[in-house]
Image (cartoon, grey):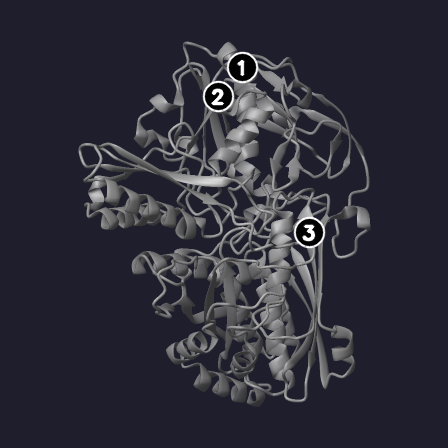
Amino acid sequence: MSPASTKDRSDAGIRSISALPRAERTFVDDLSVPGMFHAVVVRSPVAKGKLLGIETPRLTHGGILIRASDIPGENRLEAFGNSVPILALNEVHYIGEPVAILVGPDRSTLEKTARACVVSVAEETPDLYFEKFSSDRVAAKRTATIGDPDAAFKTAAQVIEGTYRTGRQEHWYAEPHGALAGFAYDKMEIAVATQWPFHVRRTVSGVLDVRAEDIVVECCEVGVHLDGKLWYPSLVAAHAALAALICRKPVKLMLTREEDARYSPKRPQAIFHHRAALGEGGELTALEARVVMDIGATGPFAEETLDRMCLGSLGTYRCPNIRVEGFAVRTNSLPSSPFAGFGLSNGFFAIENHVSRLAAAIGQDPIEWRKANSLRQGDVLASGLPLKEPVPADELMDAVIAMSDYRRKWAAYELLKHGREGKKDSPLRGIGIAYAYQGNGFLSNGPASNYAVELELYKDGILEIRTSAVSGSHETAALWRHVAAETLALKDSEVRLAENRSDLVPDSGPSSLSRNIVIITKLIERCCLVIRKQRFRDPLPITVRRVHKAPRSQGWSGLRMEGNPASLFSWAAAIVEVEIDQILYIPKVRGVWLCVDGGRILSDRKARSSLENSVLHALGWVRQEQVHFDAGGAPGVSILSYDVASPGEAPPIVVDFSWNESTVPKGIGELPFGCVPPAYAQAVSQASGIDFDALPLDPQALRDALEET
């Protein structure tokens, strides 16, 4: 098929997506336009092999099968230097990889036809394990050495090793992935729930071989996305747009809940091996960390995630001799996707558990060891640069200790642990602590473009904010309006957000890693300050655009783990208390206490709500959420039994802030993912008397271990 413009393929009788009443466009699945066709993806049945062909039943009622050879432009999605095939052409690399698209007027007929399709593959032996790997499967590698670790280990008073695992996790969105594509005169419009609208636009324009300006992307409700809607919506949108282009009809592609759970990307699993050397006083003299991450068949954010896993695995502790190496390994399983915490939380789970083992080995309270060995202002980071800003380690830990009554409880539970042998007449209790940071924004291998926000003050006094940043909650949008109203002495009702369409708003970049708070809010404030100076001198309307330029001065080198990994750091300490019933052996969270240094808090209510939600998601990750693969795929029975915590299971959560005079807002939403899971694991370990080193903590493993003891 030869390349063609969308104008040549438009259908004058098609009603455009933008003509739908606003109330109809909350979720993708709510959208419907007259004459709409549906699309269903035909997928690979095996994990690896040569694609030989696709046999389909006789297609009726205008049904069409679209293959990779029908793509007029590029058969790939590009993100962060990695590519993903739009449709498999000659080879398949994981179970569920898209190989074709079925399009027709009736969705149920399409689903039956898709099940009857025979995808012929010359099957090959898949690579399903990531712990051991050959060099050709390494997608990214990181190495760094500071000081002389070998000499430090030789002279150490004590050397302690440990291995820790973090499992896959499902994002479990408010609705499954989907997209609706159709024509409006000479433009193609795509409605999709995405964190990165302009990435959708670039991907679709490349696939269709048309100008990016001919593609209009409209954002639907994303809900709580946990960073799972960064790149995969672009693939789904490309499938829908390709089908619309070829059929000359509006096309809706909506994954079923089971299909989404079985075939959409997951949080990558990883394994961490730590080796620590202690001096005579129990101080950390050397630390080695080896990180191996399974990215599946591909991972557009593999390097960013690996960098953060390596950084997280070194923790927040002072150490003169460090060696770290990390590997992102390809397997024939589902592609990986970032998850809240972006790999940093995985690393913190490993190092914080290891630190508790170090403290136990020398008979010291784990919180006292942390306070004595935590980084301080002026200390050199593992990346080689000194910490220039204050580090509130003591303040945060002292505050969370007071909030939770940690000292009394820890001492009491230690006594109970050593005196309860053979007793089953009372519940087991434990308490744990962890300390973590959050780096705001992407590292240097992230998006390097300039991103903008535009504001316009109209003659009627209404201020309009134009940004493609996607809010994960309505509270963020309300916060932007409030900041603008406060700066310009307007009412909140006099500030509105422009409709998030790529033809109406500037490219504001991906909405991830607290960019909405740290960058977008700052750009809105800067625009407002300019308008405030001009509003009584220049005629209305006044339009101001301000641009964020991705910093390059920090000089971060992922290959060597050198430079400044973040322009801003926020910090948190968390304590979790648990109780284990000796009949059911199911840990119950008695309370979570969290103290945060987040710089300038723009909205106390919004900040607390964000942190409480993150605490619940972090507890779900460590307690129960686990995706089990069988021969490279997620079986239906595994997905149906996937366990997500309900709001009714929420434990008491106490959040407080370390107040300071900072005028800079910093991201805080990912901090609970860094410190709540390891604190929970330590609490369970104290309660049970058994060290647990994997996430999530398997209830059956806990039951077996306790019954054995």
Residue 325 spot, x, y in % from top left = 72, 61
- Badge 1 is on which residue? 5
Q: How many numbered marks have been drawn onto this rendered protein structure?
A: 3
Q: Secondary structure at mark 1?
A: loop
Q: Are marks 1 and 3 in contact (CB under 8 Å)?
A: no
* Quarter of the C terminus within the rendering: bottom right
Residue 214 disc label: 2
Q: Amino acid at mark 2?
A: Asp
Secondary structure state at the residue bearing disc 2? helix
Q: What amino acid is found at the position of numbered circle 3 in the picture?
A: Asp
Residue type marked 1:
Ser
Query: Of label 3 and label 2, which has the lower sequence position?
Result: 2
Secondary structure at numbered mark 3: strand
Is residue 51 at least partly visible in the picture? yes
> Left or right: 493 with respect to 182?
left
In front: mark 3 or mark 2?
2
For residue 420, side relative to residue 294 (left or right): left
Of mark 2 and mark 1, the one earlier in the sequence is: 1
- Kindly indicate whether the residue at mark 1 contacts the one at mark 2 (C-beta within 8 angstroms): yes
Q: Which mark is residue 294?
A: 3
216 or 146: nearer the viewer: 146
Crowding at dot 2, Cα within 10 Å, few <14 / some 14-19 / many 20+, comes out as some
Relative to 399, is 389 above or below? above
